[in-house]
Amino acid sequence: MDVVGSRWSARLVGVLLTITTTLSQATDLGFLLHKHPGRVQAFEQSFGTAHVFYPDADESHCTAALLLDVDPVKLVRTRGRGTPDFSLGQYVNDRPYAASSLLASAMANVFRTAMRGRCDQRPELAETPIPLEVVLPALPCRGGPRQAERFFAPLGWDVSAVPVPLDPEFGDWGDSRYVTLTLTGTLRLADALNQLYVLLPVLDDAKHYWMAPDEVDKLIRAGEGWLATHPDRGTITRRYLANRRGLVRTALGRLADAEDATDEALDPVQVEEEPPAAEDGGEQSPPEEQVSLAERRLQAVVQALRDEDARRVIDLGCGSGKLLSRLAQDDFFNEISGTDVSHRALSHAWRRLRWDQRPRSANDRVKDVFQGALTYTDERFRDYEAAVLMEVIEHIDPPRLSAVERVVFEHAKPRVVVVTTPNSEHNVRYEGLAPGAMRHPDHRFEWTRAEFRAWADRVAGAHGYRVRHVPVGDDDPEVGAPTQMGVFTR
Ligand code: SAH
């Protein structure tokens, strides 16, 4: 692989990225990337051409290369208008300087399906971590090798970042701002691609690429499953969004909300301090992130349960177990359980609760954390004082919502039901969220306050409950709080 990377990079300025696997049946990489190992393929981009080819493809070792051929004329034509912060000179005169954002954009275009983790021919392989080596022969890297290590190592990569000398013939000229980056690790291919998509421009930090309005969405989508728990998520988010405060705040809030966040996301998102960079006029200081919305929601739900004196609680749609873990640490509660339809979410919850290491002592508050679907009546949902549906109903397809209502309010029928859901009116306050867009790709709907009230009143009336409404988060005088909570009692 090294051979491949350096041999090609020496001759062609354009070889930017190679991905190698030593998976048995290594040529399955072709299925995962949706690009045939036997062909050289070219994909027209707005700025030139992206080529995909396999310098090496046999059963034990397979390398795919993505090569960008940047056409300065095309670049000028497509990027010249409406892109005020776009510095053409850098693109035209110093191609590799711009490589990272162009490379990310080509990846999104050429490997779109692979980045979504879809592979109809090898579905299980797309879900499985596989041995990978990624090589970028000349990666612009602000902060040098240490920064590359900081960003990639927490994701499970072995990182080798070797500074590229300004001129190999004149060693005492020192190093350029490029590194040769080699990442080795066992990861899902889709995760690897998404991490590169986000982190290459972030390492470059050139800030001259155009901030499209949907940039937050792109970041959240590509960051799924790794960014919310990355120790440098604040820095990564700020750099990715070119320090646009409103966008950064929105993105960090949504990251904290990401439901498949792993254990570490237990803590509210903190924005790391990064010293201002002198060379580009100084970065703005990071936005002061107060307590995240996710944290305020947890606190609001716990408070509602306390107010209703409900000590035996089941968390329906518990996700990664943030609430369960909070309740488990609180003496007020006697018996808590959680259920979710997603095995992936449950494995996070089990890990968070250290379910396998936990001594099954009699006074253990956590009774059960099990797989279950809210659309089917289940005896295990019964006999609790309270049920919580925190940010769950908006994930249910509307035609199935009435089944969930019956399962919860008619069959399980606890004394207290706490439901939280986004207030869609508040979405206009999220910079970077397109008008009418929802906060999360898996949301099936988001309700206004009136819509939630109408639903809650009808359900309460039909099943003998009363309901009170509680805003969660800053209650905006015009559009209300970001989260709405209904506390049902009977
Ligand atoms: N309550 C958690 C997770 C919210 S995300 C929190 O606030 O952090 C929504 C969760 O609902 C997901 O984990 C999803 O798997 C789960 N879910 C969606 N439909 C479900 C269903 N029909 N049955 C059980 N869980 C469901």
Image: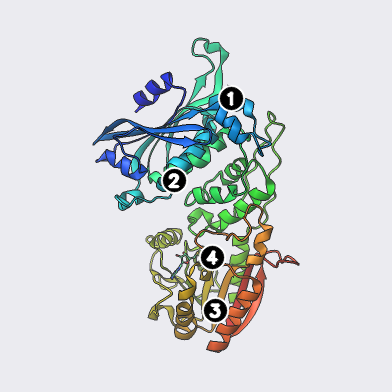
Badge 1 is on which residue? Answer: 92
In the foreground, 46 or 54: 46
Tell me the element at label 3: strand
Q: Which residue reaches farthest right? A: 477
N-terminal-most mark, 3 or 2: 2
N-term mark: 3 or 1: 1
Q: Is residue 93 left or right of residue 58?
A: right
Q: Report if the beta carbon of the residue with label 2 is closer than 8 angstroms to ligand 1.
A: no
Q: Where's residue 398, x and y in %?
A: 49, 73
Task: Give the SS element for disc 1.
Answer: helix
Which label belongs to residue 124? Answer: none
Amino acid on which the number 4 mark rests in the picture: Arg
Q: CB of mark 3 within 8 Å of CB of mark 1?
A: no
The amino acid on which the numbered mark 3 sits, given as a three-letter code, is Val
Q: Mark 1 packing: few (<14 Cα in 10 Å), some, or many (20+)?
A: some
* 118, 258: nearer the viewer: 118
Measure the alpha-carbon separation of dots 3 and 2.
41 Å
Query: Disc 3 marks which residue?
Result: 417
Q: Nearer the viewer, mark 3 or mark 1?
A: 1
Separation of residues labelled 1 and 2 (CA atoms): 27 Å
